[in-house]
Amino acid sequence: MRVVATSDTHANSIQEFPIVLLDSLKNADMIIHAGDYTSKVVLDQLRELGSFRGVHGNADPPEIRLELPEIATFDLAGLRIGMTHPAEGGMPFRVQNRIRKRFEKVDVIVYGHTHNAKTERKGELLFVNPGSPTRAWPARAKTFAIIEIEQTIEARIVHV
């Protein structure tokens, strides 16, 4: 199973996304967005592409906040996935410790807000921050993540 994860798109339409991300989204088994769409149009367009899961971010308008939760968990291919957009502040290097406390018994946590892409394993738990594909400040590069689920789960950051 191939999951494309993105966050912090800060766009008015998916037409503002890099072509490589658009191609990956169209070929994904599932699309995950970890908040800060900033436009309901983006949310609607992502849903039209296929199987979709998302949470809202701190920069999202009320119509997105009404449709999407702040925190979500769901099962996928025998794994428990957690998602959040941790905008409550604090030191960026401690974000994983803060968000870990929000979830019980998850295998993967996909999170946004920092705009800096990162994958990291802590024990059995895989953290995935897709970064920002539009290089919204303070992102250092345009990025998104691909999560492959087979016998194991692996995630990689794609630099556009």
Image (cartoon, grey):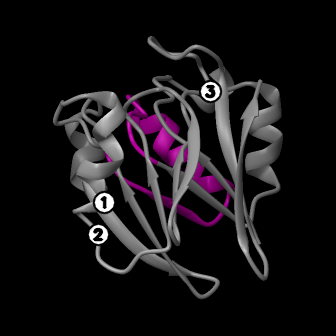
* Residue receiving disc 3: 133
Residue 92 at x, y percent in the picture: 33, 29
| In the depicted structure, whether residue 92 falls above or below residue 128 | above
* Residue receiving disc 1: 100
Q: Secondary structure at mark 2?
A: loop
In whole angstroms, how far apart are the C-alphas of marks 3 and 2? 26 Å
Q: Using the image as rendered, state which of residue 49 and residue 129 is in the foreground.
A: 129
Which region is colored magenta? 34-56
Q: Amino acid at mark 3?
A: Pro
Q: Amino acid at mark 2?
A: Phe
Residue 38 at x, y percent in the picture: 38, 28
Q: Using the image as rendered, state which of residue 109 and residue 134 is in the foreground.
A: 109
* Residue receiving disc 2: 103
Q: Quadrant of the C terminus?
A: top right
Q: Using the image as rendered, state which of residue 93 and residue 132 is in the foreground.
A: 93
Residue 44 painted magenta: yes
- Tags 1 and 3 touching, CB below 8 Å: no
Q: Earlier in the sequence, mark 1 or mark 3?
A: 1
Q: Secondary structure at mark 1?
A: helix
In the displayed structure, does residue 114 sit left or right of residue 127? left
Q: Residue at x 42, y 75 (%)?
A: 106
